Image (cartoon, grey):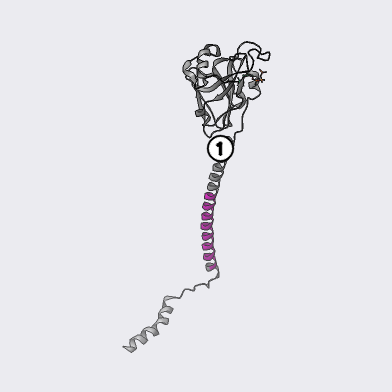
Amino acid sequence: MAFWSGETLKERLSELVNPADPECIDCAAYTLKVGPEYYVTPTDRTPDPKSVSLKTLQLGEAFAIPPGQFAWVLTHEVVTVPKNALAFISIRARIKWKGLINVSGFHVDPGFSGRLTFSVFNAGPVPIHLRHNDPTFLIWFADIDRAETDYAKAAKAPVTQLDLTALNQVAGEVYSLQGLADRIRSTEKDLSSRITALERANGVFAVAAGVVLALAAGLAVQWIVREFSPPIIPVPTSARAALLAPLFSVQGGEQ
Ligand SMILES: O=c1ccn([C@H]2C[C@H](O)[C@@H](COP(=O)(O)OP(=O)(O)OP(=O)(O)O)O2)c(=O)[nH]1
């Protein structure tokens, strides 16, 4: 088995990919572009996760795959693998480095014809954005050891759209670690602000209780003083003068 060189790819390009662009030959690989359809699994923030379906992209339109989410992306090109060849598929390194993993990947059968479906997973920490027609995927072709084989894929109409039957089995919300971590963080924040509010309310209550207690104590002391002190008997003015007279007379005698 030998992998095809860039030169072989260039010579046979028109029978391998449609539309073909020699500029997309990258060493011994051909770079495939993002096509017109995709599906991204909804996150826990999606309002109605069950109603999310595949979407179509206009030229130049982009979409994002959030962290921890799974996506299907159709290629722009229709790929045809000759019956005496086998192809291998992957994602460009610069996109893989962001955390995009090719879930299905790996091979395209001899005799296959159609747009390829890349099922991918964002294992990175941030959303990964892809744009219609951006060079994103790679394909390598290799000879198999016979010129003709009965085991090639039977010829049928080329795949041009995402397979809805298969999509029905993966549609739905994916509880990603990132989503769960976000939810834990927001619950923690909510809880801590509620605790702070409770502590503040407790402080106000303690001050109010202190003031009420002080007032009650003051009133109680006043009441005790009033109830239990001996009554003050008023002394008539003439009697007061008689009582004070000896004092004034002693002071006057000393002079
Ligand atoms: O990531 C991938 C992998 C494969 N294929 C295409 C090329 C391949 O030739 C075809 C079928 O792949 P495979 O034989 O692995 O899948 P299957 O589930 O056995 O499908 P089938 O019953 O059509 O053989 O699907 C893709 O589009 N994307």
- Residue at 63% x, 16% y is 110
Q: Name which residue lies at 57% across and 15% down.
A: 79
Screen quadrant of the C terminus = bottom left
Q: Residue at x 33, y 86 (%)?
A: 252
Quarter residue 87 falls in: top right
Mark 1 residue element: helix
The picture places residue 8, in percent across and down from the top left corner, at 52, 16
Q: Is mark 1 within 8 Å of ligand 1?
A: no
The one nearer the camera, 193 or 134, is: 134
| Residue 19 percent location from the top left of the image | 51, 13
Q: Which residues are magenta?
A: 199-224
Q: Is residue 49 above or below residue 196?
A: above
Q: Nearer the viewer, residue 140 or 199?
A: 140
194 up-or-down from 105: above or below: below
Q: Position of residue 168 (x, y in %)?
A: 65, 22
Inspect this view and state whether residue 247 appears. Answer: yes
Seen as rendered, the residue at the extreme bottom is 254
Q: Amino acid at mark 1?
A: Asp
Neighbour class for label 1 at 10 Å: few (<14), some, many (≥20)? few
Q: Main secondary structure of the magenta part?
A: helix
Q: Which residue is mark 1?
A: 182
Side of 57 relative to 166 (left or right):
left
Residue 18, visible in the rendered structure:
no
- Counting the numbered discs, the total is 1
Q: Quadrant of the N terminus?
A: top right
User: Per the image, is 214 magenta?
Assistant: yes
Q: Is residue 90 magenta?
A: no
171 left or right of 255?
right
Q: Position of residue 104 (x, y in %)?
A: 61, 25
Of all residues shown, which one is farthest toward the left?
255
